[in-house]
Image (spheres, helix red, strand yellow):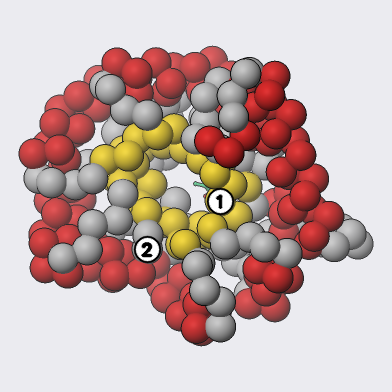
């Protein structure tokens, strides 16, 4: 990892979010930074907590369940977001562990999450993930399936906060962010989970309310 400190990395990201938001005449406070800590252990995460970061994201239920209970015991106000694909048989674990779920992408998962939320009487906000570049290997519902999935999620009582996407890797993200923003507007949703280390400023200028930044905060993953 860069030889600089967690403090300086975090304040650099906050500065860049603020500059992008200001450029787009948005309030920087309307953009939540989610520090994606997947693959990094507690010793890498603690400095960021000490620097003031409280919102973290993980992509695997099991990894998060192994790492976070202990970190949470010693820190108040931690919020944990699930940003990776979720198997329906882990829905109960996910509802118990996470404060937001960004990867709702199919009818069977909506049903499993709704049942898990009813059982636990706990309703973390959810984002519907859209396969915005229509890539076969990626999670997310097809653009054409979004209205029906959203209707199902709403009818099942899932608190839908917005849409989430990971644009195609080698292409300019901006058109995909713009499409996701349009889809959200069309559906009356305000939350937009988009933007990662390489493109979060672009995402902020296009309306991101949640940016998911890993590498720029933690260094590259092994
Ligand atoms: C890993 C991951 C991120 C963070 O990616 P970086 O390029 O390291 O910032 C964001 N979103 C999702 C869904 C991820 O899996």
Q: Quadrant of the N terminus?
A: bottom right
Q: Which residue is mark 1?
A: 34
Q: Earlier in the sequence, mark 1 or mark 2?
A: 1
Q: Can residue 212 be seen here? A: no
7 over 172 or under it: above or below: below
Q: Nearer the viewer, residue 115 or 30?
A: 30
Measured in 3D between alpha carbons, the distance from the residue under mark 1 to the one under mark 2, in whole angstroms, is: 13 Å
Q: Nearer the viewer, residue 25 or 123?
A: 25
Q: Residue at x 35, y 69 (%)?
A: 97
Q: Position of residue 93 (x, y in %)?
A: 28, 70
Q: Which mark is residue 93?
A: none
Q: Position of residue 143 (x, y in %)?
A: 31, 23
Q: Residue at x 42, y 23 (%)?
A: 180
Label 1 within 8 A of ligand 1 by Cβ: yes
Residue 138 figure quarter? top left
Q: Position of residue 188 (x, y in %)?
A: 28, 22
The local secondary structure at tag 2 comes to loop
Q: Nearer the viewer, residue 212 or 144?
A: 212
Circles 1 and 2: CB atoms closer than 8 Å: no
Q: Residues within 10 Å of mark 1 (few under 14, many from 20)?
A: many
Q: Nearer the viewer, residue 177 or 88?
A: 177
Q: Residue at x 54, y 15 (%)?
A: 175
Q: Can residue 154 be seen here? A: yes
Q: Position of residue 133 (x, y in %)?
A: 45, 24
Q: Which mark is residue 98?
A: 2
Q: Quadrant of the C terminus?
A: bottom right
Q: Residue at x 46, y 80 (%)?
A: 69
């Amino acid at each position: 990892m860069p030889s600089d400190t967690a403090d300086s990395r975090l304040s650099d990201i906050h500065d860049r979010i603020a500059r992008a938001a200001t450029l787009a005449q948005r309030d920087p406070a309307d953009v939540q930074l989610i520090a994606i800590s997947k693959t990094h252990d507690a010793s890498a995460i603690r400095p960021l907590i000490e620097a003031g970061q409280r919102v973290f994201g993980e992509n695997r239920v099991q990894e998060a369940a192994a790492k976070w209970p202990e970190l949470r015991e010693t820190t108040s106000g931690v919020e944990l977001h699930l940003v990776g694909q979720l198997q329906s048989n882990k829905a109960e674990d996910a509802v118990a562990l996470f404060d937001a779920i960004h990867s709702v992408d199919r009818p069977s998962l909506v049903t499993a999450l709704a049942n898990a939320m009813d059982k636990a009487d706990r309703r973390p906000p959810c984002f519907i993930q859209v396969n915005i570049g229509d890539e076969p290997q990626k999670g997310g519902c097809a653009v054409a399936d979004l209205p029906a999935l959203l209707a199902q999620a709403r009818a099942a009582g899932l608190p839908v906060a917005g849409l989430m996407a990971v644009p195609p890797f080698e292409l300019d993200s901006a058109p995909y962010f713009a499409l996701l923003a349009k889809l959200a507007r069309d559906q009356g949703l305000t939350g937009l989970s988009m933007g990662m280390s390489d493109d979060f400023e672009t995402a902020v200028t296009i309306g991101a309310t949640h940016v998911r930044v890993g590498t720029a905060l933690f260094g590259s993953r092994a």
